[in-house]
Image (cartoon, grey):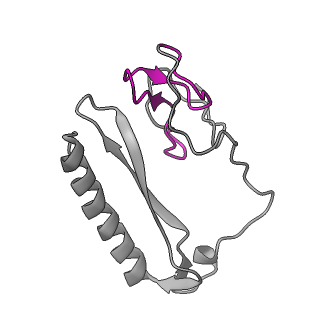
């Protein structure tokens, strides 16, 4: 299965892209059926799927992120993590958007810790599966 984000070819049955970690299927909020990420409606029950966009991400031709320029500061655009339901399917993905400008490593670590706490709380709230430790 080809990833809709990075176009990486993934083995059949995978839930996430092995290259960029993008979800490879969407769970229907109505019947729970797995659907390709480009679908707007469930192929089993025709319920609308919860997607924000069907646009494909395209990598720029040339880009050197600030985190590779040799400094101790980083651009923190966002950190994301999936939240799994009791069936082990992705219920939704939490994303924390980073602050504008460049940040130090401590801020990056703080965002990562906050994402883990938020993911655990959301998982508990929906009665989902806790992440493996």
Count of all numbered marks drawn on residues in the image: 0
Q: Is 25 on the left-hand or right-hand side of 82?
A: right
Quarter-wise, where is residue 15 in the image? top left
Q: Is 23 on the left-hand or right-hand side of 107?
A: right
Q: Is residue 91 magenta?
A: no
Magenta stretch prevailing secondary structure: loop
* Towards the viewer: 10 or 46: 46
Residue placed at 49% from the left, 38% from the top?
A: 23
Where 79 sits versus 88, above or below? below
Point out residue 79 in the picture as x, y percentages from the top left corner: 45, 62
The part of the chain drawn in magenta is 17-44
* Towards the viewer: 103 or 47: 47
Point out residue 51 in the picture as x, y percentages from the top left corner: 55, 40
Q: Quadrant of the N terminus?
A: top right
Q: Residue furthest right?
A: 61
Residue 131 can be seen in this image: no
Residue placed at 42% from the left, 75% from the top?
A: 108
Q: Residue furthest top?
A: 44
Where 66 sits versus 42, above or below? below
Q: Is residue 32 magenta?
A: yes
Point out residue 61 in the picture as x, y percentages from the top left corner: 81, 57
């Amino acid at each position: 299965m080809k990833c809709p984000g990075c176009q990486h070819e993934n083995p059949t049955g995978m839930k996430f892209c092995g290259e960029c970690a993008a979800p490879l299927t969407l769970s229907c909020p109505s019947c729970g059926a797995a659907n390709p990420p480009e679908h707007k409606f469930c192929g089993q029950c025709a319920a609308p799927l919860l997607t924000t966009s069907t646009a494909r991400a395209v990598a720029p031709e040339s880009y050197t992120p600030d985190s590779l320029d040799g400094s101790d500061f980083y651009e923190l655009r966002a950190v994301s993590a999936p939240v799994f339901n009791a069936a082990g399917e992705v219920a939704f993905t939490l994303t924390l958007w980073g602050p504008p400008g460049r940040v130090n490593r401590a801020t990056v670590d703080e965002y990562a810790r906050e994402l883990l706490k938020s993911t655990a709380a959301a998982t508990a709230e929906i009665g989902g599966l806790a992440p493996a430790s």
